[in-house]
C-alpha cells in the first residue's frame, strides 16, 4: 500500500529536496519507518526514542494522529501523511 | 538596542533574526534573545518615561535594532483598582484589572500585531496573514491597512459575527475555513511553507510573541514601578501567559524593578482546557482537545506553548484552572457590574477563575493581584443574550409606575 508523505521545507535537506515521498505501510509508524529506511537523517529530526518529538505534529488526511491511535493510527492506501511543526498559532 | 538572535527553547540552537519560527534540528519553538548587559537601569527608566505613549516606549526590550513605530500604536491601557469586585468575590486582596480592550482594535492582539507588522516591513514583506480566533483577525486587518500592506486573514467560518464584520471592514481578504482553529492553524502552517507572506503567528511568531511582554512592563509602571504578587491571565496557546512572565523577568534582570516573579494563575474554558488538564494531571504534555466552548477566542485545542505555560504555573506556585460556560457568562456580568468594564468571553474566563481562587482562599490578604482583560464585550454579544432583560413600557408615567413604582418609592 502506498501513501504520500508531505515534508516541510526545513526537512527537505534530509530528503534530497523532495517535498513529497511515497512510502508503504498500514500504520503511521510503519510509514515513517519506511521513510526513515530511505532517508535516515529524518529519524532523529522528528523522533526521539521511537516517539514523535513533542513539537512535531503528524496528520493523516488532515486529522492529528493524537486524536487517533498515535503511531498506530491506520493509514489507508492513497492517504496523505503530513509532518508539520507544532509551534504555530495563538 | 539589545536584540541578539533567535534561539531554540528546547535545544538552544541559534539562528539569525529572519522569518523562521521552529528549530530545524528538533522542531522546538524559536525565541528572540537579547543582551541587556549594556542597559543601565536609571538611564533605561528615563528613556522609557520620555518615550512614546504606548508600547514603543519599550523599544529597548523589543526585537528591533532601531526605534520602531507605527501609526496605530497600542498600549498603555488602563490599570484599574477594583475594590467592589474584590468585595463581591469576598477577598481582601488588592484586585487590579488591566483593561486591554482599550487598544485600537479592542484586544491585546494589537500589541503582538504591531510588533509583527513592524518586523514584516523591516524584512521587506508586502503581504501579511494570520490564523485567528477573531481578535487577531481584527488586529491584522487594521494594522495592515494602516501600514499599506495586503492581508489575508484565516478564521474558523463559524466565528462570532461581530468579529467577522470588524475584520472585513478594513479591506482584508477574509477567509472562513470550514473547521476549528486548529484546522485553520494547520492550513496556515502549510501555506506559510509555500507563500512568500508574513504569517504573523506562524513564521513571524517569535517576534509577534514579544509584543505580549509589554503588558508586564506597563503593569510595573502603572503600579508605581512595583511587581504584582499574582497574575491571573487567560491561556489559549500559552504565549501571552508565558510572555507576561518573561517581561517581568527581563525587568528584574535589568534592575528596573526589585522582587521575584509573581504567582501565575492561568484561566481556561472547561470546553477547551488542554493546559488546565495537563496541570491537574501533573503532566507537562498537553493532549489536544476538540474545543466546545463559548470562549472562542481561547478555543485552541492544541496549544503551541502549553508545556511552558504548565511549567510556569508550577514553578511560581500558581495553577491553571478552568470554568464552564455558565461561569464565563457570570464572570462577564460580575466584571461589568463592579467595574463598568464589559469584556468578551475570554475576560469572563479570567474573572471566573479569579472568583474561584477567592473562593478557594488562595488570594492572600493585601496581595496585589492583576487580572488581564484581553478583549471587548461588544465582540461576543451572543454570550450574554439569554441573560439580557428589557422592561418595555408605554410612554407615560403611569406605565412606568406600574412596573417600577415599588422599586423607586420616594
Image (cartoon, coloured by chain):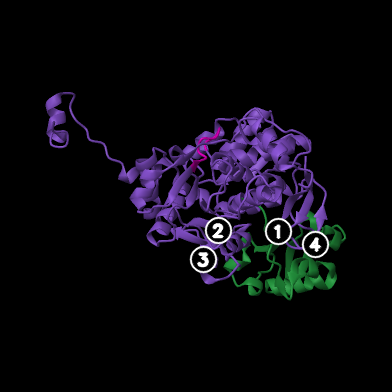
Magenta segment: does it hold B228?
no
The residue that disc 1 covers is A84
Q: Where is residue B358 in the image (x, y as percent from the top left)?
A: 40, 57
The residue that disc 2 covers is B301
The residue that disc 3 covers is B277
Dots 1 and 2: beta carbons under 8 Å? no
- Of tags 2 and 3, the one toward the viewer is 3
- Of tags 3 and 1, the one toward the viewer is 3
- Of tags 1 and 2, the one toward the viewer is 2
Q: Is residue B257 visible?
A: yes
Q: Position of residue A19 (x, y in %)?
A: 80, 57
- Marks 1 & 4 on one chain: no
Picture colour for chain B:
purple
C-alpha span from label 2 to label 3: 11 Å
Q: Can residue B62 be seen in this view?
A: no
Farthest residue to the top: give it: B396
Highlighted magenta segment, given as a residue range: B98-106
| Camera-side residue of B55 and A54 | B55
| Among the two numbered marks 2 and 4 on one chain, the one whose residue lies closer to the N terminus | 4
Dots 2 and 3: beta carbons under 8 Å? no
C-alpha span from label 1 to label 2: 16 Å
The residue that disc 4 covers is B25
Amino acid at each position: 500500500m502506498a501513501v504520500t508523505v508531505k515534508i516541510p521545507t526545513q526537512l527537505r535537506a534530509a530528503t534530497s529536496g523532495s517535498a513529497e515521498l511515497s512510502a508503504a505501510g498500514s500504520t503511521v509508524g510503519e510509514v515513517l519507518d519506511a521513510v526513515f529506511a530511505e532517508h535516515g537523517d529524518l529519524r532523529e529530526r522528528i523522533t526521539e526514542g521511537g516517539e514523535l518529538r513533542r513539537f512535531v505534529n503528524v496528520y493523516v488526511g488532515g486529522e492529528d494522529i493524537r486524536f487517533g491511535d498515535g503511531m498506530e493510527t491506520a493509514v489507508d492506501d492513497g492517504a496523505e501523511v503530513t509532518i508539520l511543526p507544532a509551534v504555530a498559532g495563538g | 538596542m539589545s536584540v541578539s538572535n533567535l534561539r531554540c527553547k528546547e535545544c538552544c540552537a541559534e539562528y539569525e533574526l529572519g522569518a523562521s519560527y521552529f528549530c530545524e534540528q528538533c522542531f522546538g519553538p524559536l525565541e528572540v534573545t537579547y543582551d541587556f548587559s549594556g542597559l543601565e537601569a536609571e538611564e533605561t527608566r528615563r528613556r522609557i518615561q520620555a518615550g512614546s505613549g504606548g508600547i514603543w516606549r519599550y523599544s529597548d526590550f523589543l526585537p528591533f535594532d532601531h526605534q520602531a513605530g507605527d501609526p496605530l500604536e497600542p498600549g498603555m491601557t488602563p490599570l484599574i483598582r477594583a475594590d467592589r469586585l474584590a468585595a463581591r468575590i469576598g477577598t481582601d486582596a488588592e484586585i487590579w484589572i488591566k483593561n486591554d480592550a482599550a487598544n485600537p482594535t479592542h484586544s491585546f492582539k494589537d500589541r503582538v500585531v504591531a510588533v509583527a507588522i513592524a518586523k514584516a516591513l523591516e524584512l521587506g514583506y508586502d503581504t501579511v496573514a494570520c490564523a485567528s480566533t477573531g481578535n487577531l483577525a481584527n488586529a491584522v486587518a487594521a494594522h495592515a491597512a494602516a501600514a499599506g500592506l495586503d492581508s489575508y486573514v484565516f478564521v474558523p467560518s463559524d466565528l462570532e459575527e461581530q468579529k467577522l464584520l470588524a475584520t472585513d471592514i478594513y479591506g482584508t481578504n477574509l477567509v472562513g475555513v470550514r473547521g476549528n482553529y486548529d484546522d485553520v492553524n494547520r492550513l496556515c502552517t502549510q501555506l506559510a511553507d509555500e507563500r512568500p507572506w508574513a504569517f504573523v503567528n506562524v513564521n513571524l511568531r517569535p517576534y509577534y510573541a514579544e509584543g505580549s511582554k509589554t503588558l508586564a512592563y506597563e503593569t510595573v509602571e502603572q503600579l508605581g514601578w512595583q511587581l504584582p504578587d499574582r497574575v491571573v491571565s487567560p491561556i489559549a496557546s500559552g504565549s501571552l501567559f508565558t510572555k507576561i512572565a518573561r517581561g517581568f523577568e527581563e525587568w528584574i534582570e535589568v534592575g528596573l524593578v526589585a522582587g521575584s516573579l509573581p504567582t501565575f494563575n492561568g484561566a481556561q474554558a472547561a470546553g477547551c482546557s488542554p493546559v488546565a488538564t495537563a496541570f491537574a494531571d501533573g503532566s507537562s504534555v498537553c493532549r489536544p482537545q476538540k474545543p466546545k466552548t463559548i470562549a472562542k477566542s481561547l478555543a485552541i485545542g492544541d496549544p503551541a506553548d502549553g508545556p511552558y505555560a504548565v511549567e510556569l504555573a508550577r514553578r511560581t506556585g500558581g495553577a491553571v484552572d478552568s470554568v464552564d460556560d455558565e461561569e464565563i457568562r457570570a464572570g462577564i456580568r460580575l466584571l461589568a457590574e463592579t467595574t463598568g468594564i464589559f469584556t468578551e468571553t475570554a475576560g469572563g474566563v479570567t474573572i471566573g477563575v479569579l472568583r474561584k481562587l477567592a473562593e478557594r482562599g488562595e488570594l492572600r490578604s493585601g496581595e496585589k493581584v492583576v487580572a488581564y482583560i484581553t478583549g471587548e464585550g461588544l465582540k461576543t454579544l451572543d454570550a450574554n443574550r439569554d441573560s439580557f432583560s428589557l422592561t418595555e413600557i408605554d410612554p407615560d408615567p403611569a406605565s412606568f409606575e406600574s412596573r417600577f413604582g415599588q422599586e423607586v418609592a420616594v
